[in-house]
Structure formats: structure tokens, C-alpha cells
Amino acid sequence: MNAADPSRPFNFAAVLGLTILTFINLFNYLDRYLVSAVAQSPKKSSLALTDLQLGSLMTGFLLVYMAAAPIFGALGDIRSRPRLIAFGVACWSIATAWSGAVGSYWALLATRAAVGVGEAAYGTISPGLLADYFPRTQRGRVMSIFYCAIPVGAALGYIVGGLMDANFGWRAAFFIAGLPGIALAALCLRLRDAPRGAGDENSIQSRISPAALPLRKRLWNLAGNRPYLLTVLGYAAYTFAVGGLAFWMPAFLERARGMTRSEATVSFGSIVVITGFIGTIAGGWLGDYLAKYSRRAFLLLSGGATLLAAPFAWFALTTSSTRIYTITMVAAQLCLFLSAGPVNASILNLSGPLERATAFAISVFAIHALGDVISPPLIGWISDTSSLSHAIQIVPVAIIVAACLWFYAAWSQHEGQEPV
């Protein structure tokens, strides 16, 4: 039996695949935001990092990540997807553990950059594999389960990193974070590679060989797909905001709010994990419900929720009241995470089954090149020249830009539009 049988959408192979890939996504983001949680320790250690150098650690990782993404995206549409994912997970796990043994800024930058090679394999291929495990009518919910690992993993990165740093030192945090990935890489090899297009019962592409759609044709299809391009541009603005906020919030709370390092990481991590889990799951289910009435539902939901998040984020970053900060930050994060499942489901729905890894590879490249590659060092540079309190106020502006682009993408999408 195929891994994904539309008549049995929750068969064991599909559920196993979703479970393993979701856990990988969780440890992916735990690793990514571990750096933010321990950032102040390398700054005050013998490495003596500046804010600009701290921000560049994320940039180094993301530059390699987005450079490798097109390669794995092209391979992911024609090669064994579980094997490619397993390779990527093993690579990033080794690089993460190695980060705890470095003795200079440049060595730390190199190990964090190496993590990007592994994550490129996983990040570009997993969504398309999940789309083939489950039918189209459940795509919003599946993506919400998969992407709810982002806030949970990010929160665990803050919490685990903060606690490990306080009790055992920042190096130990990287050693611990790298170990689970080896086991997850082995589990990936047990996954079945579902037939491409298995979740798109009416798709022409689901009945042809992957070799029949060359890379040049995939790129041409996506380049002429205006709703897809606008969705990715909106995602880039969203990633700029979320990436900058996620990286600098612990430091912001420590410097501007007078919290201790452990208080800052644990408090913000708690907000992220609660709002992220609730918002992401709710967004996926709501998106699937609304999609019964309109193909534009995912984009309209993403744009509306993100626009609502902007004023809450502004008040959270500018108020001097701890109570108002907590209320508005919870509201902002909840609204932001509502769009996590729907916007990725939109990318799946706006691309054909034989070009989805390529579509996500382009998305990965664009959202990071225009998003969180820029925002952490830019906020760090503004912070070095003025203050972190002023620098972080660019986040709400980026949130508004994301919302506007998603509304434009929804307007550009014809009700009957579907890739073939």
C-alpha cells in the first residue's frame, strides 16, 4: 500500500511520517533559537562578541541554508525524500554539537553556518512529502501540526538554552541539543516516499513521472505564478519581523526590562510556546474550514491575522508597563502564529505536486535572503548606534508589510486557480 492513500488519510505510514517530521521540526527550531538564549554568555566570555557579531551568527547559518536550499529543492522533486532528509538531519546535529567546542568567533560562525547545509535538506523537502501523505482537504491541519513545532521548539530553545547556560555553561547547551538529531536521522530512513501527487487526486501531474517535469520547467511555472510570488514576498516580510523579534527579545527583556537572563528566556519562551501552539493549531483548522468556501481563505486568514498583530507588537515593544507588555505580546504572538499553517498550505496549493520541493526551496531562499538574514544584524547595528529599544521597533513595520502582500496575493489568485 502506498504511504499516502487518499481513501485512508490517517493510515499508519502517514501518521508516522507526520510525527517524525514534526519532531525534527521541533529540534530544528530548538537548535536555531538556542543561540539567542545563550547569546549574552559568549558576548561576556573570552570570545567577547559584539551585538553585530551575535546577529551575524544567525545570518551565517541562514546564508548557507538559503544557498543549499535550491540544490536540495531540485533533488527533492526527483530523488528519495526520506534519504535526503535523513542526510540533512545528521549533518545539522553534528554541526550543532561541534558548536560547543569552538574557541573563536570565526569557528563558531563556521559551525553555525554548517548547520544550514543540513537544515536546507529538511526544510525544502518535508512539506511536499507531507502533502503527499494526506489529502488536500486536510492540508491546513497537517501543516498546522507540523509548524506548531516551531513555537514549541523555539520556546524549548530559549528555556533549555537558558537553563543549561545558567547551570552548566553555554557550551553544554550545544552538546545536548545536537544528540537527538542522530536518532531522528535514523528514523527518517524508515519513512516511505509517497507517490508525488497522491494527495492531489485530480492533478494531472500526479499521473506522470517526476522526470517528465525538468527543473527549467518547474522554475518557469513558478516564475509566472503571481499569487505564489506575492505569497513568498509576504512570507519574507513576516520572517524579517519574526526572526528579528525571536533573536533579540531575550536581550531586550534583559536590558530594557531589567530581567535576569534566565527570567528573560523562560518568560518569553513561555509566551511563545503557549501562543504558538494554540495559534498555529487554530490557524490550520480555521483555514481548512474557511477553504471549503474560498480558495483564497488561507491567504485572507494570514493577511488578516498578521495585520491585527502589528498594533499589539508596537505596544508590547514601547510600553513601560509589565502588565501591558505581557497582554499585548501574548496577543501579538497569537495573531502571528495563526498564519503559520495557512501560509505554508498556500504555497503547497499554489504549486504542482512535481514542483513543490522546488517551490519551497525558492521560498526558503527568498524569505531568509529578504527576511531573517537581514533583521538580526540590522537590529544589532541600530542597537550599537542607538539602543536596542529603538532598534526593535522596526518589527511592527515589517508585520504590516507582510499583511499587505498577503492580501494582494489573495486578490491576485483566481477562485478556480489550481496548478496542473
Image: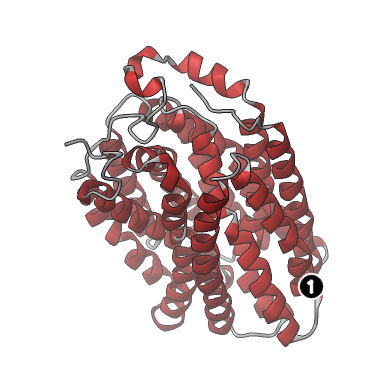
* Residue 164 screen position, x and y as percent: 41, 77
- Residue found 78% across the figure and 70% down from its top: 389
Relative to 240, residue 409 above or below: above
> Depth check: 133 or 93 in front?
133
Residue 98 appears in the figure:
no
> Depth check: 339 or 266 in front?
339
Relative to 362, residue 32 above or below: below
Looking at the image, how many numbered discs can be counted on the residues? 1
Left or right: where does residue 104 sit relative to residue 8? right
> Depth check: 252 or 318 in front?
318
* Residue 248 screen position, x and y as percent: 64, 65
- Residue found 58% across the figure and 50% down from its top: 290
- Residue found 28% across the figure and 30% down from its top: 195
The residue type indicated by label 1 comes to Phe
User: Where is mark 1, residue-wise?
Assistant: 315
Residue 183 appears in the figure:
yes
Colour mode of the rendering: secondary structure
* Residue 255 screen position, x and y as percent: 70, 78
* Residue 84 screen position, x and y as percent: 30, 36
Left or right: where does residue 180 sit relative to residue 321? left
Relative to 342, residue 346 above or below: above
| Residue density around tag 1, few if under 14, some if 14–19, many if 20 or more, within 10 Å | some
Quarter containing the N terminus? top left
**Element marked by disc 1:** helix
> Depth check: 90 or 323 in front?
323
- Residue found 80% across the figure and 78% down from its top: 319
